[in-house]
Image (cartoon, rainbow, N blue to C red):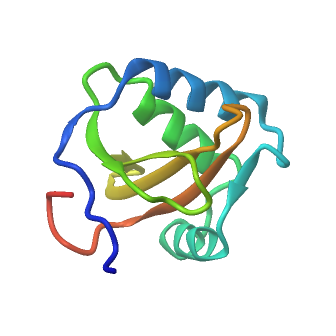
C-alpha cells in the first residue's frame, strides 16, 4: 500500500497550534525532538543560528492566526502532524511538526528551504 497523501491546505486549528507552541516555550529538550535530517538542513540553511532559533521561528509561525497547512495522515510515530510554510531570516521554509498523542511532546520532522516552489 502506498503512502497516504497530505490533506488539502486549510487553516491549522488553533488548539493544535497552541499546544505545539506551549511545548516549544518549555524549551525542554526531552519534549522537543528534532530529527537528525531536520537539524542538519536547518544548520546548513542558517549556520550562524543559535539552537533555540528553530523553536522561535516555528513559534512565530504557529502563533499567527490564519496559518494554513495540510494535515499529514499516517505520521510515524503516531500523532497529529501538520505541514506548513513559514519564514525565517528572509528565507521561505517548509515545516512539518508532529504533536504526539500525550500533547506534551513534539517532533520537528521538517524545517528546511522549500524544494518545490511556493506551495505545499
Q: Quadrant of the N terminus?
A: bottom left
In this view, 40 is above or below 13: below
For residue 102, which quarter of the picture? top right
At x 42%, y 51%, the residue is: 89
* Residue 106 spot, x, y in % from top left: 65, 45
Left or right: where 79 falls relative to 82: right
How many numbered callouts?
0
Left or right: where 102 falls relative to 96: right
At x 26%, y 63%, the residue is: 5
In this view, 32 is above or below 109: above
| Residue 84 seen in the current view | no
| Residue 22 seen in the current view | yes
For residue 76, which quarter of the picture? bottom right
At x 23%, y 50%, the residue is: 7
Q: Quadrant of the C terminus?
A: bottom left
* Residue 72 spot, x, y in % from top left: 37, 53
Left or right: where 17 falls relative to 2: right
In this view, 57 is above or below 54: above
For residue 101, which quarter of the picture? top right
* Residue 66 spot, x, y in % from top left: 25, 23
Amino acid at each position: 500500500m502506498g503512502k497516504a497523501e497530505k490533506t488539502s491546505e486549510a487553516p491549522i486549528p488553533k488548539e493544535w497550534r497552541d499546544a505545539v507552541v506551549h511545548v516549544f516555550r518549555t524549551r525542554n529538550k526531552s519534549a522537543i525532538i528534532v530529527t537528525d535530517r531536520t537539524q542538519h538542513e536547518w544548520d546548513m540553511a542558517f549556520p550562524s543560528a543559535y539552537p533555540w532559533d528553530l523553536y522561535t521561528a516555528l513559534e512565530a509561525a504557529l502563533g499567527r492566526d490564519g496559518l494554513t497547512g495540510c494535515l499529514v495522515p499516517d505520521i510515524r510515530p503516531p500523532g497529529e502532524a501538520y505541514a506548513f510554510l513559514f519564514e525565517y531570516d528572509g528565507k521561505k521554509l517548509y515545516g512539518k511538526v508532529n504533536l504526539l498523542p500525550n500533547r506534551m511532546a513534539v517532533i520537528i520532522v521538517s524545517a528546511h528551504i522549500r524544494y518545490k516552489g511556493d506551495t505545499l
